[in-house]
Image (tube, rainbow, N blue to C red):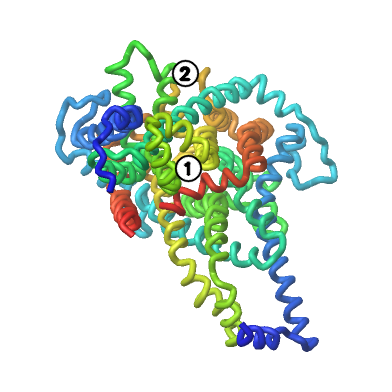
Amino acid sequence: MRAEKTNWGATAMFLAPAVFLLVVFLVYPAIYTILLSFNRGRNGLLAEWVGLDNYARVFADPDFFSLGVPPSGALWNNLLWIVFYTSFVVFLGLVVAVIASRVRYESVVKAVVFLPMAIAATALAVIWKFVYAPDADLGVLNALLGAVGIAPVPWLGSPQIVNAALIAAGIWGSVGFATVILSAALKGIPAEIMEAARVEGANERQIFFRIIVPMVSLPMSVVAVTLVVNVIKLFDLIFVMTQGGPGKSSRVIAFTMWQQAFEAGQFGFGSAVAVVMLLVLIPIMVFNVRRFRAQAVT
Amino acid sequence: MTALDQPMAGSQPLTPAGRIVVALNRSAIHLFLAFVGLIWLVPTIGLLITSLRPRSDIQSTGWWSIADLTLTIENYRQVLEAQGMFQAFVNTVIIAVPSTLLPLAICALAAYAFAWVSFPFRDTLFLVVVALLMVPVQVAFIPVLTMFREVLPAFELTRGYGAVWLAHTAFALPFGIFLLRNFFITLPPDLIEAARLDGASDLRIFRSVVLPVSVPAIAAYGIFQFLWVWNDLLMALVFVQDASKFPMTRAIQNLLSQYGTEWHLLAAGAFLLMIVPLIVFFALQRYFVQGLLAGSVKG
């Protein structure tokens, strides 16, 4: 129908600022970083080519990845985050959404759980650093343990516990996101289906796993993908709560990238870590582009 | 309908035992939700109480010992004046306002082109924007800093706010364009075609037709972007290198590394950082939730 001539003037006027900034600040830098990852990268300049040397050093670095028993390193910690943070946030988000839907004060529950989404990761980090304070007269968690006769636990001071403690704080911050999205999806389940199941004698657990979970599985996967992407880019929370410590036990990929590039001045190494981040995200990028094209066609 | 109604009525528990089961279930639900409420409120309330207690009290007893509660705003006064948090608050505002308005304007323009201007490779180019959504900002840090230093040394962008404004604006574009384009495309085509037939230019259609009906979507995105920048630490860490221009997130990080156990300062600082997002959250909750969720749901 509309075989119009391209209005180049209008196109340029609307697109020029965005295209200029995207090319200068995102596309060109991404290519430059890929090149830098094969270079010594002194001062951020392409001076001395080193082949795959940076990647060899990244993967030989036990602080980045080490296949011990148990495995450790930034890459492994990020994997722990992806598995535990994502599954707990989605599961708890759905449970809170389902149970809150049964009461009149549903919107209050959702607002309370969603509140941490509004505040800075820096503030969230201070809140939880305080909860985890090792002194039982300061940290509420150790005070509670003390009340039942358990000695204070160094939540953020022990390499064995620190990742679990950080992930718990992260879960607390994100459950509201899952709750709000999944709660909207729940409203889309026809009431007749639930009633029919109850009539047939299904108990609450069967209704949850056989009806609710399958019917909201699509929004659940959307939430999960969003969480995985966020967690691969995770930085602020770790930086403020532990600086990757104790030692280097709670580092994640984005923290290693920042630390290597801007504290140690290792631009080649830092670029290689950034490229690893990009590579990890590319499958999700392809997935999103495919999904978008499929939607656009239908 | 009737087939469903009948067994439904029959399934209502009428026996006393049935009523007790229902009542127990109800109270289990309320108990669970009360527990959820406690877990989500206690950590924040604990820090709020701490921010209002005198330093000596904080060091001797936990915030939950309410028996001897004395409240003071001394911590806030101290962190604002002596620790420079007032300047940091101003810096956060100075960083956040242009870093919200610039992407808003640039994204709205580009989104209109992607939705309603026809040009070659439009849909391919838009897929590139969708792909750029996933590119982590980390891949841009080193080249952009090098570029500021080597290509534009005279501007000293990282000494002022210029670098962080530009970086926030550029990195916001993929999401903003994606979100607004997906909204603009849902506008009725007749609306735009009618304006075209009347001889309106694209700029005029954009200003007088598209923008006025898109205020809710643009507001939702604007609030999202504003809070994103307000809450950001990473970009400020990389692109703001003059200590007198640090935003609150960096000021709190500095407090933490200097006085890791001075909880009277940390608690007050954290609440100063939270106050604006909390006001926005309670005042504009609908827009805020929409803005935050639209991208992931529509995606």
**Secondary element at tag 2:** loop
What residue sits 33% from the left and 45% below the top? B130
Residue type highlighted by circle 2? Asp
Q: Which chain does tag 2 point to?
A: B
**Secondary element at tag 1:** helix
Q: Quadrant of residue A67?
A: bottom left
Q: Is residue A276 above or below residue A212?
A: above
Q: Is residue B244 above or below residue B9?
A: above
Q: Which residue is mark 1?
A: A238
Q: Nearest the camera: B181 or A101?
A: B181
Q: Quadrant of residue B36?
A: bottom right
Q: Quadrant of residue B86?
A: top right
Q: Position of residue A246 (x, y in %)?
A: 47, 43
Q: Look at discs 2 and 1 and give the one toward the viewer.
A: 2
Residue type highlighted by circle 1? Ile
The disc placed on residue B242 is 2
Q: Is residue A182 above or below residue B200?
A: below
